[in-house]
Amino acid sequence: MEMLYGREGNLTRPQKPGWLHPSDDSRRSAWRNYLEFQASGIEEPVVTHSDRFKNPAAYYPSVYHKANVGLWTLRSIAGEDRFDGALRQYFETWRFHHPYAEDFFASMNHALGASYDWFWSGWFLRTDAIDVKLRGLRVAAGPSPGAGPRAELLLRSRGGIDPPVPVLFRDGAGHEAMGVVPREVFLPAAGDAVYRPVLPFMPTEAELDPKFTLPDIDWSDNRTSGWPRFQPMFDNGRPPPKPIGKTLLLWRPDLWYQTKEGVEGGIAFDASTVRWEHALQGLVGLGAGEQRGLRAREQRPFADLEARVRSLAAEPRRIVRARGYDMDGHRGFRLSMTEDLGQKIERGFRWTLQAGVDLDRLYDPEVPRRRGEWSPGGHANMEGTLSSTRKFHRVRWTGSVRLRSHLLSESISYGSIYGTTTADVSVIPKFPILLHAVAGRVRGSAIPPEERFYLAGAGPRGEWTSRWFRSRGTIPTRWKAALGRDGNVRAFADQRPSGTMLFALNAESRSGRFIPAWMPLLSKLRVPVIDPRSSLFADAGEVSDGDVAIRDMAADLGVGFRTRPLFRNHLTLRADLPLYRTPPEPGENPWKLRAVFSVGEAF
């Protein structure tokens, strides 16, 4: 503690507002780590010897986080004073000795005056968990005229450990009553139990473990009320600790400009729980609307919502996403499922499979930056992506293959394949190199323009996913802008060639400073506030409606600069300066200063 806080206590530390900086302690941190680890599916018993863990990643969470949470849990079950006294007695008895796990269990049972073998065996010797569910609440008249009403709680315990559970009863008048469901009610029913207490009032709702003393792996089913508990907090750009038993709701105001409808403002939010990142995120707000003569602008609501769901009982590594949107001239939805395959296909490679369907309708063609690159839409598409990663000695490799086609549509007919691979090479000291290669082809009798491949950057579908590119107003049309993806031969952003076949190669060396580290005398030069970082790049590629010819390939090379604004530390602003490109336009010098603006990394 002195290493963390010096000789100053907590009372002398500056107090920060809770809505911006949530309170946290070691107990909450250990519980969060355990709950996230328990959902990973790699848990092993706490007493496993360190060199016998099947998965090395399970060692630290099992031995430290789960053991820590287990002691906190037993302290709440046995009572704080009894547990603290028993732990002191264990220290006095076994100091200067070498106790084993069985010695610790026996010493605590003796000092507590009761047998907790049901907890030791489940929590430490096996991988059992606590998962109690409140299935319902029923209320009936008391057994006698003078007695109070009898409540009936329908419970279910499926984690393997059946602990005594605190329960809180409430009614509409503000009366409350606490009780404890004894663990014995679970034993005869194999996890299904009925608890019938007599109360002084007629309860309307009940809640299990209201103070969160038990590490239940799912607190969402512990109340008769199905509404989640939110802890709203302003999104200051730093990931805050997630609260126990609540849903962290990060929010921030959002504004941007659209040429047709003017300023649009809304609230961006991101809801997460301890066991689930980004469970619900999106943007809701009001647009200024289009001016019609002398009439006032009519405000139009817009929304973009995405929910992520998974079934822990079925497959913890499977993620289902559902997205719906109505904004910036587009209306549509997307359903997808992502599953982490681990090393099932090839040992040493980590594989991920994603499959989904989507539908997009362009109901306002005046909003997109380039109207000719969009079809009216309204047709369904299906897509499947297989991606893989692997880390070699000095190379980090990633690759993916995407298949996309129309689904049950008569107005269009197409099918495409798109592959990409990236290698982060660190063979040369102080000179890292990123190598990137893409190839794609689309065929069909009626290919929508948004399904074509683009040489200089992302196509219209890729641009629409970024607010900075999907509207004519966010980035002025006179600027040369290219969002990374597709061919990424950035010097041709002003021409934006497209086709049904694509092949491209990219090489880039990104520096962590304004002056690269391989220039020792100048590498310490820094630019304050914006802190730009430089890169060297070279691109080559070809896109056409026929066969790709090597002799017709376009190429460029130049330098780039990127920075991250202070107000959003995860947003990358990039300016690339292609100093050379070939083939040049008629009468143009291949060597010329050009500039291409973008948001996000090139690839």
Image (tube, helix red, strand yellow):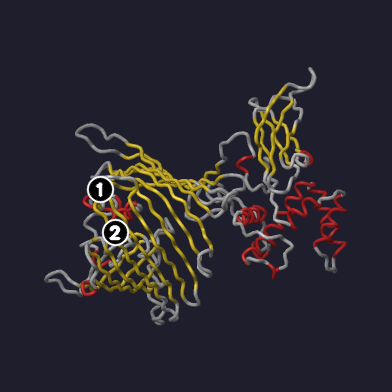
The mark that comes first in sequence, 1 or 2, is: 1
**Residue 415 in the image, given as x and y percentages of width and height:** 31, 55
Of the pair 408 and 532, the residue shown nearer to us: 408
Q: Nearer the viewer, residue 181 or 300?
A: 181
Q: Amino acid at mark 2?
A: Val
Image position, residue 303 (x, y; %): 38, 41
The disc placed on residue 442 is 2
Residue 98 seen in render: yes
Which residue appears farthest toward the left when viewing the image?
587
Quadrant of the rendering where the C terminus is positioned: bottom left
- For label 2, the SS is strand
Q: Which residue is mark 1?
A: 375
Give the number of marks.
Answer: 2
Kind of element beneath mark 1:
loop
Image position, residue 197 (x, y; %): 76, 30
Q: Residues within 10 Å of mark 2 (few under 14, many from 20)?
A: many
In front here: 138 or 199? Answer: 138
Q: Is residue 353 left or right of residue 435?
A: right
- Front of the two marks 1 and 2: 2
Q: Within 10 Å of the Cα at label 1, are there few (<14), some (14-19), or many (20+) other Cα atoms?
A: some
